[in-house]
Image (spheres, rainbow, N blue to C red):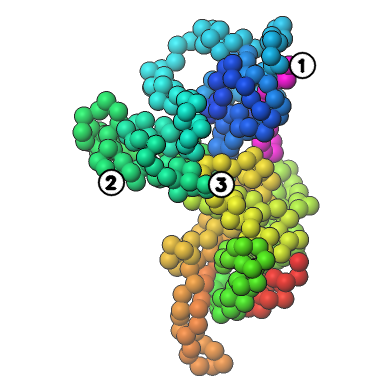
């Protein structure tokens, strides 16, 4: 029986999706659970799995198309089966029925051909890395990537191109790429970079932000991480980070302050029934926010495992739709980049985001005397339609209290 492939709804209130690429060609066999296509959402480019076995046919959408959610874009057929009457035309017919695309889009499509069977068997490589490898004349057969199971990432290609001097695109004279870039004075953004630019501009211009900052002595947090590291590493195989501890503490503070975990609907405030904490993660061409679900109900070990898995897949451009959907609050931690303090832009429809700085030794008063202690700064950005100043201050007050005595809160779940 023919199974329709439709544009999936990957986020709340999503009306359309943008097809980034097909991972299978027309006529190829597809197994249930295999990655079939990539779709661009408001937050990231995500891989979509096939929901059934079959042969891909009747493809009517091509990369770059913006398609309504639920619309059929292809079919998965049994051997010998035909595309249902009135269904999508074949890719060739679809191309013929469309106006000719621009030279730039044709060039982009030509630069990202499907992998050959031999490449697919021997090399694990992200789609972006494959495109960059062809642009920079990098032989992927000679590389072992830095991603999971040796997968080659875009950064591996760029590093190789830079070290070998193979940075010019195929067919371009030596130095042409860098010269053209310098002359143009413009850096072209990838899909994630464009989305980040669009969504942050939209948030900043439509959401009434305000900011509340607290500094907190981090001695107890550092001690708690040290106390828990050996236990969690032994039981779960991962060492918890300060971000993991913050996810645990923030989620418990959100449970006491549901308005900070709420959403502005356009006409009122919706209190979210779940506490799903997103963690901002840097990738090749931007930032994605991956979600740890029901964070207040799980322990630090499970949080650490989920965060590590999400980080690895984000860097490999292999996030799933469920990894980026449904967040109710976001943490952006730039401590590893030695940042003293910063403010973050809210990710709608969330009502707040917490910006966390580096932990640094500072001279502070302790029992009326100067002493050196580790201190970090936190800034809560809030949507004033949902969270007023008093509520934001109360949330930070309770969170600081948990940070000063974290062990009991961290061991609750």
Q: With 164 as the anchor, is 128 left or right in this view?
A: right
Q: Which residue is mark 2?
A: 163
Question: Real-space Cα distance between discs 2 and 3?
Answer: 26 Å
Q: Residues within 10 Å of mark 2 (few under 14, many from 20)?
A: few
Q: Which residue is mark 1?
A: 1
**Residue found 55% across the figure and 28% down from its top:** 23
**Residue found 64% across the figure and 39% down from its top:** 321
Residue 22 in percent (x, y) is at 55, 25
Query: Split into 4 quadrants, where in the image is the N terminus?
Result: top right
CB atoms of marks 2 and 3 within 8 Å: no
Q: Is residue 23 above or below residue 263?
A: above
> Residue 313 — which label?
3
Of the two numbered discs 1 and 3 on the same chain, state the one appearing first in sequence. Answer: 1
Let me know if residue 2 is in the magenta part: yes
| Near-viewer residue (388 or 262) | 262
Query: What span is in magenta?
Result: 1-14
Q: Residues within 10 Å of mark 1 (few under 14, many from 20)?
A: few
């Amino acid at each position: 029986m023919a199974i329709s492939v439709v544009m999936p709804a990957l986020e709340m209130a999503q009306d359309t999706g943008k097809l980034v690429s097909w991972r299978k060609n027309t006529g190829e066999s597809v197994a249930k659970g295999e990655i079939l296509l990539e779709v661009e959402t408001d937050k990231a480019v995500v891989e979509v799995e096939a929901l059934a076995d079959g042969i891909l046919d009747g493809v009517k959408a091509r990369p770059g198309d913006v398609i309504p959610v639920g619309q059929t874009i292809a079919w998965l057929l049994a051997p010998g089966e035909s595309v249902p009457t009135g269904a999508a035309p074949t890719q060739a017919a679809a191309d013929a029925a469309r106006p000719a695309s621009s030279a730039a889009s044709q060039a982009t499509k030509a630069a990202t051909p499907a992998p050959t069977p031999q490449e697919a068997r021997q090399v694990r490589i992200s789609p972006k890395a494959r495109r960059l490898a062809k642009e920079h004349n990098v032989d992927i057969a000679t590389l072992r990537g830095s991603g999971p199971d040796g997968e080659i990432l875009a950064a591996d290609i760029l590093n190789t191109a830079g070290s070998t001097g193979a940075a010019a695109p195929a067919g371009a004279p030596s130095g042409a790429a860098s010269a053209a870039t310098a002359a143009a004075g413009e850096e072209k953004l990838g899909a994630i970079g464009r989305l980040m630019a669009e969504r942050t501009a939209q948030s900043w211009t439509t959401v009434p932000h305000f900011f509340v900052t607290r500094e907190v002595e981090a001695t107890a947090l550092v001690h708690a991480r040290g106390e828990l590291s050996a236990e969690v590493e032994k039981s779960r195989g991962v060492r918890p980070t300060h971000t993991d501890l913050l996810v645990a503490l923030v989620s418990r503070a959100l449970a006491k302050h549901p308005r900070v975990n709420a959403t502005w609907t356009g006409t009122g405030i919706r209190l979210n029934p779940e506490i799903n904490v997103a963690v901002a993660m840097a990738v090749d061409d931007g930032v994605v926010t991956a979600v740890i679900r029901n964070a207040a109900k799980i322990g630090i070990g499970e949080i650490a495992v989920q965060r590590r898995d999400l980080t690895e897949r984000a860097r490999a451009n292999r996030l799933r739709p469920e990894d980026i959907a449904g967040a109710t609050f976001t943490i952006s931690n730039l401590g590893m980049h030695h940042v003293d303090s910063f403010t973050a832009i809210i990710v709608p429809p969330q009502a707040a985001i917490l910006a966390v700085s580096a932990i640094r030794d500072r001279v502070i008063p302790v029992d009326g005397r100067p002493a050196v202690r580790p201190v970090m700064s936190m800034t809560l950005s809030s949507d004033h339609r949902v969270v007023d100043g008093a509520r934001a201050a109360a949330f930070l007050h309770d969170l600081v209290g948990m940070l000063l005595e974290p062990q009991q809160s961290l061991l609750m779940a």
